[in-house]
Image (tube, rainbow, N blue to C red):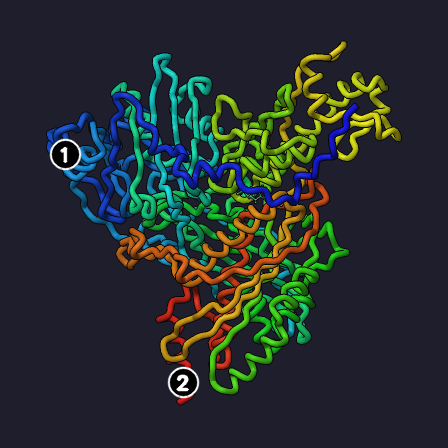
Amino acid sequence: MSTEQKPAGCLGVAMKRKEDPRFIQGKGRYVDDISLPGMLYLSLVRSPYPHAEIKAIDIGDAMKVPGVVAVITGKDLEAAGLGWLPTFHGYDKQMVLAIGKVLFQYQEVAAVFAETRAAAADGAEAVQVEYAPLPVVADPFTAKRDETILRPDRDKKTNHIYHWEVGDKDKTARALANSPKKIKERIWFQRCHPAPLEPCGCVAQFDTMGRLQFYVTSQAPHVYRTALALVTGIPEDKIHVVSPDIGGGFGNKVPVYPGYVCAIVGALKIGRPVKWIETRTENLTSTGFARDYHMDVEIGATPDGRVTALHVATTADHGAFDAAADPTKYPAGMFGIVTGSYDFPTAHAEVDAYFTNKAPGGIAYRCSFRVTEASYAIERAMDILADELAIDPAELRRRNFVRKEQFPYPSSLGFTYDSGDYQKTLDVAMEKIGYRELLKEQAEKRARGELMGIGFSTFTEVVGAGPSKVFDILGIKMFDSAEIRIHPTGAGIVRAGTKSQGQGHETTWAQIVGEELGLDPQNIMVEEGDTDTAPYGLGTYASRSTPVAGGAIAMAARRVREKARKVAAHMLEAGEADVEWKDYKFQVKGVPARSVTMKEVAFAAYTNMAQIEPGLEASYYYDPPNMTFPSGAYVAVVDIDRETGEVKVRRFLAVDDCGIIINPLIVEGQIHGGLTEGFAIAFMQEIQYDKEGNNLNTNFTDYLIPTSLETPAWETEKTVTPSPHHPIGAKGVGESPNVGSPAAFVNAVIDALSPLGVRHIDMPITRDKVWRAIHQAEAMTT
Ligand code: CDP
């Protein structure tokens, strides 16, 4: 039958992104592009105080501002039973608008609805709030003392939120006590913010049928639909959530924010659509921050550099509400990955979280739930140990790597790593960067008093939440889903429960379908983000899309293929068992000349069905058997100006292993983007608060975003160790560069400064911190 040539495979092909023509031409459709007849604008009144009693709110002047239609306060919402909203993992609740007191600077206090954006802002300015300041708790160590209880609304009258631990406490303590060598360091991963280019926003409308049409910047639209049904009592079929194009998310667009609830309440009460788009300052000061983990890391070792035990005790600053975005059973996320790529015979990790007068969050910023903090801690600590033992940091890592033959590897903190070849990845990195030559150059420079550093990070991630036996959000299991429909001409559509925010799903999901069905991915349309059409999924964050939804898409395609096999058997006049899928087409076993393509089968499925049910479509809800464990070996080379403290990143090489690669162009783009964010965190970014709880980084002049001028040129390389349990052997990659790179940068800086006796500097490593470290060291020696 078919004389067509075998189509080339679609995996590993650097296809250009199908979505880019739309974005490059400015034709994306974002929430702020949506304008509905009669639409009102919402502006929020925010607190100037980090902790204060609200004595009175006077809305009289605001209501007189031309164009202002309504003002609501926390008391109004409380009366309607909507005063509080549950936080992501369900252990705490958050005020929608302040009730009785404010708990952080820029907290939402009142909502103003007006005919225009400007009138809403003017109205918010005119709301008079009388505050009586209260004592401020600006850090978790002060919070620990419980002198001021921040959340008297809770049963537990303490600022302590939770204690979480994993591993063998006693065995680890004994092993540490008996270890001939030990290091201990407090390592802080500073508070930072995802700062997506498009801030958060929504448009809420109740249509003529009384159904909520909710357009929103959400990374997880189905979870929003369920959460809104639970919070508002609106039946779930009367809620339609649409996430149109999203300008970056990085975890920031996972939580449900007070502005969304206010927009919905306004739309319901006033009977007109309401738009809320936050400003950059609102985004930086009140939406989900990331990190803020103070980690006391202790490693025991033998004199020849074999690790014997790891203990990490973390004090976490969660801000005013416990809105950390973690799966229900993991209050400290995947922090148990803190043993990293190393074969620790025993380990114990514990996290204690506290309330402070800061914005709530603790979201998974380009990170699989606290993996970035864990990776940074272990990769910094391994360098400190190498320094203590006077062993080359690459060699120390090599001596302790989980070996290739140990996989599947049960870590002492409970994960079963699926696959990896850490030694090979490090070898590729050392070869490509020219480590020997760099060491020689460094020795020469040191002899001349110049400061040059080489820093490694050989991290392991855990991504793809996750297996339903342990992972859920608000009780909903963390599977993902796909529906595939192939049209008569061999084109098709795949719908998934994920939501791209720049990752290129419109291209890679089509490639998976193309690979599994032998069809042209250019003609496979991908649709996400509409809860009326997409199957239920848990959304896109934490590099879970490829490990979970990617698996669902491959499995749904295989179901389509099984249906197609029946049609092919009928067309080939052969028994089904005699028909095999080979070289991207169906053929009679052993008779390649008798074959049909999927395109031909698709047409027959609608025109020549014999006794077979018409159509060619399938769906699959994929519950992954395990997480995937991507890894990498990163190397940074830096030069430091001794006079000014300026650090120049001369080279940066990232060797990543994310298993089978769907699209190398997209993966490289993901790595470039993540490295740029890791660079910014290492050298530029911190959401700082002063002792009075004032946020000092409220816009992009104080919270720095790297431009092409500062950003180093990235070098990339790969190794491929397939995931044995994933349908196409792929692991996630989006988070890896952001997870792995901060430690490489910091290790390189400390390596450069080590001849001066500098052992650790907390991020961000600004020029003045480096200058001070150099001058303090010089002062000690003169
Ligand atoms: O969950 P998220 O989409 O943020 O992260 P991801 O699963 O790591 O995927 C990021 C992008 O890289 C997607 O377009 C993936 O399909 C693509 N990717 C790939 O081409 N090959 C891999 N092995 C992993 C991801």
**Residue closer to the observer: 46 or 284:** 284
Q: How many marks on residues?
A: 2
Q: Quadrant of residue 307?
A: bottom right
**In the rendered image of this protein, does residue 70 appear above or below residue 336?**
above
Q: Residues within 10 Å of mark 2 (few under 14, many from 20)?
A: few
Q: Are marks 1 and 2 in contact (CB under 8 Å)?
A: no
**In the rendered image of this protein, does residue 193 appear above or below residue 20?**
below
Q: What residue would you read off at disc 1?
A: 58
Residue lying farthest top?
611
Quadrant the N terminus occupies: top right
Residue 132 drawn at (x, y percent): 18, 46
Label 2 beta carbon within 8 A of ligand 1: no
Residue lying farthest bottom?
782
Residue lying farthest front?
3
Tell me if 520 is positioned left or right of 192 in this view: right
Q: Is residue 410 visible?
A: no
**Residue closer to the observer: 17 or 435:** 17
Q: Amino acid at mark 1?
A: Asp
Which label number is shown at residue 527? none
Q: Residues within 10 Å of mark 1 (few under 14, many from 20)?
A: few
Q: Residue at x 43, y 35 (%)?
A: 245
Tell me if 644 is positioned left or right of 102 in this view: right
Q: Amino acid at mark 2?
A: Met
Disc with the residue nearer the chain's start (1 vs 2): 1
Q: Is residue 425 visible?
A: yes
Residue 506 drawn at (x, y percent): 54, 35
Q: Residue at x 82, y 20 (%)?
A: 572
**Residue closer to the observer: 704 or 402:** 704
Q: Residue at x 87, y 29 (%)?
A: 591
Which label number is shown at residue 780? 2
Q: Quadrant of residue 705?
A: bottom left
